[in-house]
Amino acid sequence: MKRIIDDDLIVSCLAGEADNGELEELAKEMAGSDEVTQDFLAIKNVWDATVSPQTISSIDVNESLRKTLSEIRECDEAGLSFKRRSLKFIMRFAAVMSLPLLLLSGYLYFNNNALRPQHVAVALDVKAMPGSLVHTLLPDSTEVWMNGGTTLWYHQEGEGRRDVTIEGEAYFKVAKDTVHPFVVTTPSSLHIEAVGTEFNICSYPSDSLTSVTLTEGAVRVDDNSWESSMTPDQTIVYNSNQKKSVLYLGNTEKIVSWREGNLAFHNEMLKNVYKRIGQIFDVQFDVDKRLQNVILYATFENASLDQILSLIQKSTPLNYSIYEDSEDGTSKKRIKVIAG
């Protein structure tokens, strides 16, 4: 029978609340059993990869861990029954609010023994709320950073390819797997295929432009009628209305700086600045025609929407009129930008 480490001990250690006695007990348990070591490290690997200090401050760590462990134990008790039937995990959550489900998925992936037969199907939905920044781990151990207003769907059927659909902006650090390609599909029907690389995608449904920036490795991009291979520091901008694309050497550091909470605009027209702010914060901007081509050069570090608007207003003669409802009947906030 499989030897299982005490759940209370796991919770105390991962939550940073274990005393010297508990730490010694854990060390003895792990030294005496490879199964205990695997059990603990599988959970710790996912915890370390998915939980940041900011996340910890916003959740009940003990409750999240206990819920996760309860789900894991139910899976362990099922034993070999997983070999005889298809296993499908459907996880839907917003940012860190359903952290236990993410941890459970990662545990099942890292602990790849009887629980990962060839016909396993894994599905995952993740959403970054407007104005937020989410760093998470997919079941295949690919790291993803998601910008505000982004939704991601992950699916892998058995031993097939890893399929991701995205609406918004995300940076992928793809786990290398030459047998199972990692394929991202955007709202513009653009497909980005990789096996182990790092790249950024920006493709909001309301925008006809999709950009793909490669920082490391290689990817192949296509829309079913053309394809292009990319090398590091290249950016492809695809116009879904015109079915045309442009490939150029981009300012990679600036493009991906949003992962650190920065919003950088270098010689950008105000109409484009407000478009990007609107995508990230889910706000509709109506910009005065007299202001649309005004050039802005600025970098905002971990700034809220109000702070960004205030700083732009200080550098440019303009005013704002804010409405809680948009003209299209949605609940999206609408802001009119008027020349001052």
Image: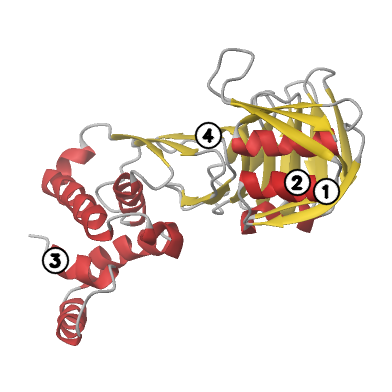
Q: Earlier in the sequence, mark 4 or mark 2?
A: 4
Q: Nearer the viewer, residue 164 or 133?
A: 133
The reply to whether the C-beta atoms of the residues labelled 1 and 2 are less than 8 Å apart is yes
Image height check: is 74 above or below 62?
A: above
Q: Name the spot of residue 225 as percent of width and height, x first.
A: 78, 20
Residue at which label 3 appears: 8
Q: Earlier in the sequence, mark 3 or mark 1?
A: 3
Q: Which residue is found at the position 73% from the left and 25% from the top?
A: 223
Q: In which image quadrant can residue 295 be found?
A: top right
Left or right placement of residue 3 versus residue 44 in this view? left
* C-alpha span from label 4 to label 2: 19 Å
Q: Earlier in the sequence, mark 1 or mark 2?
A: 2
Left or right placement of residue 131 versus residue 247 in this view? left
- Amino acid type for the residue under numbered disc 4: Thr
Q: Which residue is found at the position 68% from the left and 23% from the top?
A: 206
Residue at which label 4 appears: 151
The quadrant in which the C terminus is found is top right
Q: Earlier in the sequence, mark 4 or mark 3?
A: 3
Q: In which image quadrant can residue 26 be found?
A: bottom left
Residue 195 visible in the picture: no
Q: Earlier in the sequence, mark 1 or mark 4?
A: 4
Residue at which label 1 appears: 234
Residue at which label 2 appears: 213
* C-alpha span from label 3 to label 2: 44 Å
